[in-house]
Image: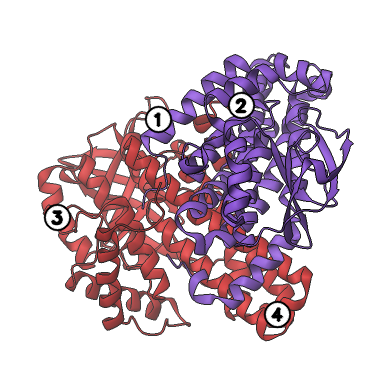
């Protein structure tokens, strides 16, 4: 038992944090969002570094690392609210690699891994992240995913509240994913949860920095318990979501039999944490937090869109409870 | 990252499970604190005989030199086997480890053995009526008297005091020194008429805790722990250990309560009710997150050494979730959960103490804000 990153995973995390701090500060995110575009220079650089294919097998042109490494990168991209279509591509690749047949893998994975192609994954009624320009969309209808090529897709671009990403509603037809669909969607849910953890962490870091600086009544506002206890609650939710998201990332690679439960937990914890923590960040920033320039709102907007992507927390919870009743031995602390 | 137990950890767990299967603690006495304590004392004697009383202690002191993870497994398995915490849990978890850091060789030789065997029960005399969260405000004083000390004051929330031989007492030995200095950590013999134990009846109706009235009790010089005037530091060592290990036992207990409640709901057909299933699912997520976060905490301790303030998070999560769970039982079971002395009726009341004992949630938030997040000191 060692619920911790390896030294190599730590290095990936630190390197990603550093790179994104330099290449994707909020000025860049804002510029891309205001122009309604992705940050193309950043995307090119990330593709050269092999980020989109980090978890794709080497035989399909990826780096062949695991879902934990992917979670690490997604967390850092969430931390930066980077305006790149990596999440959609990663989700599509996860699903196709998990549940696609040989032909589907050969057709899509090399392009998604290199970044030559971009992808997206979502439901027919959703505003699907990164779908507006995607070359391939894994489209889920009534729990069944199909692989829809751009040429066969009817894409209706949606001007969503989060302009750091290009969203769309998609219809269209394509071959079904025939493999383990639950595992494919479970992996995708866990990946989104990892991004949300990064969003929460950024909201918390910005808030702690702000309330330590901002003075009223002659003292930093962070010395008031009404404020500091709010920050403590933000940490509690962030760490809870982190525990669940890391568990899901680990289960996706190492314990597929626990993936459904792990993913359900991650979706619930991250969906709630994202909305609560980023909302709290705006509140703790006071009037400044409500302004466009303060940049806190990017986090709130991303968290809202991700929460929708994670699916109904209530439905996840109902499934989890019924699952426990059906498998008491596993739920009772089974390892 | 690996969330499975290693071969060594699995072997440890299996050996313990085998032992527990043979050494069934028997049914928990439901009425009366004396029979309950006797049950726990008997169970600790069996643990001791089997070499399981304190796996986390080093071998030289009679433990197994268990790793943190193995220690967590130990408490998880006790909980899972519905075994009690050993009677001398305060000596095993707090007193012993404090002596290992601050005690002299003579003190370790004298005290550690009887802690393990439950021959001498320990209790903890820290809190006072006017010094709860603000522990350093304590007023109990100790004055020099020949080659020893005379202690006078009042302590409160002292569990197991009526059975204890030794009490870990923090007292003021220098009234002139500033608040956190001038304190000294003593081991006080409970078997003297100058120490009176009065049970404190709590809102559940039972008496887990006591008040201590100390009127000039004698403490020999050799029972000063960590030196005169060093009491605050020694007390912090004790408090740091308060949340280690025990958390895993409590977490498993909560898991069992939740599993039982889900079974009860299923038996009543209530899992088909989305509103109830949603609420139970929410608690499933919270319960598992406590466990996962506790294991992340262990990994952090193994990487960085000392237990960190992160333990505050899991204690806070656990007490919140436990209260919500007991509350939910009243929705699932209706009046059945409101019967005095029933398992759920008891839990509903007892859970209100969880967010107070061992650090109130408000104090935990302060600790998290100041020591984890580095915010300016709260006002």
Which tag, 4 or 3, sits closer to the chain's start?
3
Query: Colour scheme of this structure image?
Result: by chain
Which mark is nearer the camera, 4 or 2?
Answer: 2
Residue identifier under label 3? B59
Q: CB under 8 Å between callouts 3 and 1? A: no
Residue identifier under label 1? B180
Residue A51 location, x and y as percent? 55, 31
Circle 2 packing at 10 Å, graded few (<14), some (14-19), many (20+), is: some
Residue identifier under label 4? B333
Residue identifier under label 2? A205
Residue B71 seen in render = yes
Give the answer, above or below, for where B49 lies relative to A275.
Answer: below
**Which residue occupies the foreground of this view, A107 or A259?**
A107
Give the answer, above or below, for where B308 lies relative to A14.
Answer: below
Label 1 is found on which chain of the structure? Answer: B
Q: Colour of chain B?
A: red
Which mark is nearer the camera, 3 or 2?
Answer: 2
Q: Secondary structure at mark 1?
A: loop
**Total tally of numbered discs in the picture:** 4
Circle 3 packing at 10 Å, graded few (<14), some (14-19), many (20+), is: few
Gap in angstroms between the C-alphas marked 4 and 2: 43 Å
Q: Colour of chain A?
A: purple
């Amino acid at each position: 038992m060692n619920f911790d990153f390896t030294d190599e995973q730590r290095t990936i995390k630190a390197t990603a944090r550093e790179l994104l701090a330099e290449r994707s500060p909020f000025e860049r995110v804002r510029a891309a969002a205001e122009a309604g575009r992705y940050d193309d220079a950043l995307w090119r650089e990330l593709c050269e570094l092999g980020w989109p294919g980090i978890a794709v097998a080497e035989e399909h042109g990826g780096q062949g690392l695991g879902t934990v490494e992917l979670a690490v990168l997604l967390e850092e991209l969430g931390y930066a609210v980077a305006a790149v279509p990596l999440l959609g591509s990663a989700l599509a690749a996860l699903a196709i690699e998990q549940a696609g047949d040989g032909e589907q893998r050969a057709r899509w994975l090399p392009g998604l891994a290199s970044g030559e192609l971009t992808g997206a994954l979502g439901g027919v009624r959703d505003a699907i992240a990164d779908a507006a320009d995607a070359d391939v969309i894994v489209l889920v209808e009534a729990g069944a995913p199909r692989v829809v090529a751009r040429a066969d897709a009817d894409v209706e671009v949606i001007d969503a509240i989060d302009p750091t990403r290009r969203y769309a509603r998609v219809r269209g037809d394509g071959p079904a994913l025939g493999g383990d669909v639950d595992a494919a969607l479970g992996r995708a849910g866990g990946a989104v949860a990892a991004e949300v953890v990064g969003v929460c962490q950024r909201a918390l870091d910005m808030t702690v920095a702000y309330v330590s600086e901002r003075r009223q009544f002659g003292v930093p506002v962070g010395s008031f318990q009404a404020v500091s206890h709010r920050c403590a609650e933000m940490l509690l939710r962030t760490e809870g979501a982190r525990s669940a998201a890391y568990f899901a990332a680990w289960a996706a690679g190492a314990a597929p039999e626990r993936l459904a439960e792990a993913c359900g937990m991650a979706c619930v914890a991250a969906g709630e944490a994202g909305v609560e923590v980023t909302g709290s960040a705006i509140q703790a920033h006071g009037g400044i937090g409500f302004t466009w320039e303060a940049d806190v709102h990017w986090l709130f907007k991303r968290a809202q869109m991700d929460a929708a992507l994670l699916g109904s927390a209530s439905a996840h919870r109902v499934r989890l409870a019924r699952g426990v009743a059906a498998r008491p031995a596993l739920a009772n602390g089974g390892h | 990252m690996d969330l499975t137990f290693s071969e060594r950890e699995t072997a440890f767990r299996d050996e313990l499970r085998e032992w527990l299967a043979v050494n069934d603690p028997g049914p928990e006495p439901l009425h009366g604190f004396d029979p309950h304590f006797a049950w726990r004392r008997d169970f600790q004697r069996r643990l001791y005989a089997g070499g399981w009383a304190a796996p986390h202690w080093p071998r030289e002191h009679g433990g197994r030199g268990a790793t943190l993870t193995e220690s967590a497994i130990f408490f998880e398995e006790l909980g899972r086997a519905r075994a009690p915490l050993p009677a001398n849990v305060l000596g095993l978890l707090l007193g012993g480890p404090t002596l290992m850091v601050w005690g002299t060789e003579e003190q370790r030789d004298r005290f550690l053995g009887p802690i393990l065997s439950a021959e001498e029960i320990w209790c903890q005399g820290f809190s006072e009526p006017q010094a709860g969260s603000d522990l350093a405000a304590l007023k109990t004083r100790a004055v020099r008297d020949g080659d020893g000390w005379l202690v006078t004051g009042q302590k409160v929330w002292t569990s197991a005091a009526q059975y204890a031989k030794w009490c870990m007492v923090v007292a003021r030995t220098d009234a002139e020194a500033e608040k956190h200095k001038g304190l000294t950590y003593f081991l006080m013999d409970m078997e003297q008429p100058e120490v009176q134990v009065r049970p404190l009846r709590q809102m559940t109706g039972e008496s887990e805790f006591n008040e201590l009235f100390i009127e000039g009790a004698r403490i020999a010089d050799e029972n000063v722990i960590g030196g005169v005037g060093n009491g605050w530091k020694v007390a912090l060592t004790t408090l740091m250990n308060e949340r280690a290990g025990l958390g895993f036992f409590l977490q498993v207990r909560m898991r069992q309560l939740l599993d039982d409640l889900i079974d009860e709901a299923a038996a009543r057909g209530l899992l088909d009710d989305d509103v109830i299933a949603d609420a139970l699912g929410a608690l499933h997520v919270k319960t598992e997150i406590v466990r996962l976060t506790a294991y992340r905490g262990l990994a952090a301790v193994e990487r960085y050494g000392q237990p960190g303030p992160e333990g505050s998070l899991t204690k806070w999560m656990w007490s919140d979730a436990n209260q919500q769970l007991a509350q939910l039982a009243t929705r699932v079971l209706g009046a059945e959960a409101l019967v005095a002395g029933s398992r759920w009726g008891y839990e509903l009341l007892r859970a209100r103490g969880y967010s107070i004992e061992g650090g109130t949630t408000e104090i935990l938030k302060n600790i998290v804000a100041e020591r984890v997040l580095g915010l300016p000191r709260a006002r």
